[in-house]
């Protein structure tokens, strides 16, 4: 079962993809969606997709920027561009990136299915190759002090919207999965939870200072206010605007 | 929009300047050569005549002088004989003595013989006494005949007496002494007088044969000369010529006469020797009218020089006029082929031809300015129209909306609606395809398949579509949307008009680097006039710019416009074939050369804006 992630700002487009493609027949499942590049960066480490459908025209971080980032951090990820905008400039940029396929909306099921089948073949081939090689052992052992360093690194860098588990792991020279496991072991918290906690705490302070949400979201490193709003509500239990009015009423 | 300058070619070579010039040169050369020939002929003829006359004069004068000196010599000999004492004795002796004895005559004969021994040519000497007793001295043994009848005539010796001792030349002893063989004798005739007493003592005839004349002639041209007596009696030379003496007005000056004889022409010249009964005739044959070599050279050289002059003049005119005009024309003609006007950059001499070039270049510049202004206006108009159109369409909005509606359909379980929307989306995506002008054949086929499945949705089960596509043609580039209008035409003007279920079959193959595509429908077909109209390169009058037909036949404008686009793409006219049988089928075949993909570069800019 290969894991597929859908990154598109239009909900109906994501839902149509989910509904119209016969995923099971392809031995695939849709493991998650993201409505923007920012959201995708934040959730991609949890979803661990093999294949990502990426729309180009998305707010805050478009598909091209996301692809540039993702191809560095996830060299094995198969990226399929899926866009309604048929412009030469986009196509040219995608050609310079290791994009698996450049597809045009509106989707034609037959075309999408054919593309997925060839993606599957590629993944199968890599899988066989990886199985032949033994799992590389991590030579660097993570110690408690290292986790502290990482925590400090997160606290001083969370405003960077592109920060995520993989980028930190690469920065410190560990594999992402190993770091994720060790981090949970040492701190009792998920890496993503910890990062979000940092950002939300900062956001709460900003909310207390009556800062508008779009400004706050940008300052804490989640420049997509829609995603920021969802994160905030999930963390604080109430929406950012409610939190702002509550805090300011109290004072 | 396209400027086609058709420069009328010189269709008939007879109208071309160079041809006319050549004809003029040939004419001039002909006239010059002809006139020079006539001129030379006149001069040569005149010169030839004078030359011949001079030659005749030389011959005749030389000959007459020789003959005269010969006769003078004989005359002197006769005088010596006259004064010989033995001859005088014979003449002075009394008649009776002479009658009685032959002593006198014998002695005189010996005396005469002494002189004749040292003198050639003398045939005989006759000496008569006053009583007409005579003696003879014969050099050659030959017989003589005396004309006694003449001898007794009283005036026989009168001419001798009249001269009182002077000698004259008579013939045959003044008509008395004849040679038996008929040869004419020239006789130095004189009356003899005693040199002391000055008494008339007798007569003497010294007869000379014509052999001395033969000797003189043989040194010249014996065949062309005839010596005659004034009475026309032949003496020496070519006897053939004797008959031509008739008709001559004999004088002591030379006279000439031209006569024709079978085979040739003769120029005859005659002279009478002064004081002598002798006429000389000289004939020059035409072929012997030899010309000086210099004249011959002139005759050959003159036409040659004329020819060279004309040739040089021809080269000059070709180099300076005809060739530059041809070059200029070919340069200008280049513009009639291309779609853009080009100035002539080639150098031409700074003369009248150069002026034509400059004027033409000025015209090109001016035309280009006008053309560019027109083009600019057109482009501004088109691009603003395009912008409005694009604003209206916003294809990605359409696509996204189709996706959304598609999801709604899926969500509501309307799978057919989703399918239709998917086809429509796919059709428009390919139909608009980025504004590319050329797309692969397989892409065009996708458009057609989507189009046909949508049409099937609209009209139900009215047609089948079949495809026979050679795999190596799938990636061939063709101008976008050339098959779709053909298929559309097949449905609306072919199959639907027939009212029964039809088939559209599309085939493609490669042959000799040419891509062949056929669209065949089993519709009502087309008549020959319709085919001709559709294939004509001129837009028919009853269709306006937008292709909206004014009459029924004009409804094939979509087809006409498509064919015109293919012609533009291939840059030639015979790229589409239509075969049809009314009521049975129509087959349109397109042939595209895969090597050259040159659009006729008209309005490239504005097309790319689309």
Image (tube, coloured by chain):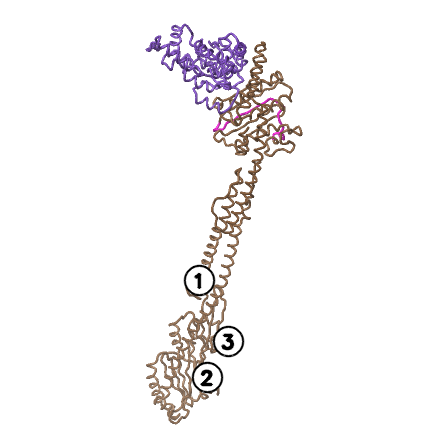
Chain colours: A purple, B brown
Marks 2/1: CA–CA distance = 67 Å
Cα distance in 3D space between marks 3 and 1: 38 Å
User: In this picture, is B101 found above or below B466?
Assistant: below
The verdict on a common chain for dots 2 and 3 is: yes
Residue B208 in view of the camera: yes
Res B298 label:
1
What's the chain of the residue with tag 1? B
Query: First in sequence: mark 2 or mark 1?
Result: 2
Q: What residue is shown with label 2?
A: B148
The local secondary structure at tag 2 comes to helix
Subunit ID for the residue under disc 2: B
Q: Nearer the viewer, residue B463 or B405?
A: B405
- The residues colored magenta run B511-531
Q: Position of residue B308 (x, y in %)?
A: 45, 56
SS at badge 3: loop
Dot 1 crowding, Cα within 10 Å, few <14, some 14–19, many 20+: few
Q: Which mark is residue B461?
A: none
Residue at screen point 38% across, 74% down = B215
Q: Is residue B455 magenta?
A: no
Q: CA distance from mark 2 to mark 3?
A: 34 Å
Residue B582 in picture, x, y percent from top left? 63, 25
Out of B178 and B441, give the one closest to the viewer: B441
Of the numbered discs 2 and 3, the one sitting upstream in the chain is 2
Question: To which residue does mark 3 refer?
Answer: B249
Say which residue appears at 36% left-offset and 86% top-offset. Answer: B81
**Pointer 2 and pointer 1 on the same chain:** yes
Residue B102 seen in the current view: no
Quarter that holds the N terminus of chain B: top right
- Residue B587 in percent (x, y) is at 57, 25
């Amino acid at each position: 079962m290969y894991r597929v992630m859908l990154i598109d700002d239009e909900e109906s487009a994501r839902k149509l993809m989910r509904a119209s493609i016969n995923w099971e027949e392809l031995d695939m499942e849709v493991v998650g969606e993201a409505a923007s590049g920012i959201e995708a960066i934040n959730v991609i480490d949890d979803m661990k997709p093999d294949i990502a459908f990426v729309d180009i025209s998305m707010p805050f971080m478009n598909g091209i920027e996301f692809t540039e980032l993702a191809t560095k951090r996830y060299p094995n990820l198969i990226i399929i561009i899926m866009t309604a905008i048929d412009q030469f400039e986009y196509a040219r940029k995608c050609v310079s990136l290791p994009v698996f396929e450049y597809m045009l909306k509106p989707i034609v099921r037959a075309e999408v299915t054919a593309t997925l089948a060839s993606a599957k073949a590629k993944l199968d081939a890599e899988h066989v190759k990886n199985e032949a090689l033994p799992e590389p052992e991590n030579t660097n052992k993570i110690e408690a002090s290292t986790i502290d360093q990482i925590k400090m690194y997160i606290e001083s860098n969370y405003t960077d919207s592109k920060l995520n588990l993989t980028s930190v792991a690469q920065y410190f020279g560990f594999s992402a999965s190993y770091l994720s496991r060790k981090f949970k072991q040492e701190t009792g918290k998920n890496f993503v939870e910890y990062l979000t906690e940092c950002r939300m705490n900062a956001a709460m302070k900003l909310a207390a200072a009556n800062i508008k949400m779009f400004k706050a979201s940008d300052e804490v490193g989640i420049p997509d206010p829609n995603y920021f709003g969802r994160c905030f509500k999930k963390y604080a239990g109430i929406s950012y605007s409610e939190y702002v009015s509550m805090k300011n009423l109290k004072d | 929009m396209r400027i086609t300058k058709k420069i009328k070619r010189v269709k008939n070579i007879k109208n071309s300047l160079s041809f006319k010039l050549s004809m003029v040169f040939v004419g001039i050369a002909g006239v010059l050569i002809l006139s020079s020939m006539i001129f030379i002929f006149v001069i040569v003829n005149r010169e030839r005549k004078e030359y011949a006359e001079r030659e005749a004069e030389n011959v005749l004068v030389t000959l007459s002088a020789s003959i005269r000196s010969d006769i003078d010599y004989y005359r002197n000999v006769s005088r010596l004989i006259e004064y010989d004492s033995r001859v005088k004795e014979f003449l002075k002796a009394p008649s009776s003595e002479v009658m009685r004895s032959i002593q006198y005559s014998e002695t005189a004969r010996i005396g005469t013989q002494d002189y004749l021994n040292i003198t050639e040519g003398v045939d005989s000497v006759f000496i008569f006494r006053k009583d007409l007793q005579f003696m003879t001295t014969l050099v050659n043994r030959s017989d003589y005949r005396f004309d006694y009848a003449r001898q007794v005539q009283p005036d026989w010796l009168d001419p001798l007496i009249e001269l009182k001792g002077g000698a004259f030349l008579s013939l045959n002893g003044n008509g008395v002494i004849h040679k038996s063989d008929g040869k004419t004798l020239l006789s130095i005739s004189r009356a003899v007088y005693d040199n002391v007493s000055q008494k008339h003592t007798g007569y003497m005839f010294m007869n000379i044969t014509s052999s001395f004349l033969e000797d003189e002639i043989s040194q010249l041209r014996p065949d062309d000369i005839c010596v005659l007596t004034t009475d026309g009696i032949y003496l020496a030379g070519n006897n053939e010529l004797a008959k031509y003496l008739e008709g001559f007005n004999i004088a002591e000056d030379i006279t000439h006469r031209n006569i024709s004889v079978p085979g040739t022409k003769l120029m005859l010249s005659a002279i009478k020797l002064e004081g002598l009964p002798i006429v000389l005739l000289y004939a020059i044959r035409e072929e012997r009218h030899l010309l000086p070599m210099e004249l011959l050279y002139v005759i050959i050289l003159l036409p040659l020089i004329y020819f060279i002059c004309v040739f040089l003049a021809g080269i000059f005119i070709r180099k300076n006029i005809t060739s530059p005009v041809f070059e200029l024309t070919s340069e200008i003609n280049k513009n009639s082929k291309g779609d853009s006007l080009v100035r002539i950059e080639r150098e031409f001499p700074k003369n009248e031809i150069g002026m034509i070039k400059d004027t033409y270049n000025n015209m090109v510049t001016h035309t280009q300015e006008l053309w560019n202004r027109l083009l600019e206006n057109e482009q501004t108009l088109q691009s603003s129209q395009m912008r409005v159109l694009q604003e209206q369409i916003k294809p990605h909005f359409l696509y996204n909306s189709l996706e959304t509606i598609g999801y709604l359909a899926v969500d509501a379980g309307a799978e057919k609606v989703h399918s239709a929307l998917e086809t429509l989306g796919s059709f428009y995506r390919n139909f608009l395809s980025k504004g590319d002008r050329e797309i692969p054949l397989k892409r065009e086929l996708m458009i057609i398949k989507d189009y046909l499945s949508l049409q099937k949705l609209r009209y139900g089960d009215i047609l089948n579509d079949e495809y026979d596509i050679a795999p190596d043609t799938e990636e061939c580039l063709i101008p976008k949307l050339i098959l779709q209008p053909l298929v559309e035409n097949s449905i609306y003007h072919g199959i639907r008009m027939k009212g029964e279920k039809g088939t559209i079959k599309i085939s493609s193959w490669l042959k000799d680097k040419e891509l062949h595509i056929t669209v065949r429908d089993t519709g009502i077909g087309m008549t020959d006039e319709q085919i001709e109209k559709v294939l004509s390169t001129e837009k028919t009058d009853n269709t306006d710019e937008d292709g909206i037909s004014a009459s029924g036949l004009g409804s094939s404008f979509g087809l006409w416009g498509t064919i015109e686009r293919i012609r533009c793409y291939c840059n030639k006219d015979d790229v589409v074939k239509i075969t049809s049988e009314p009521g049975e089928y129509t087959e349109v075949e397109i042939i595209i050369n895969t090597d050259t993909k040159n659009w006729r570069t008209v309005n490239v800019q504005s097309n790319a804006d689309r």
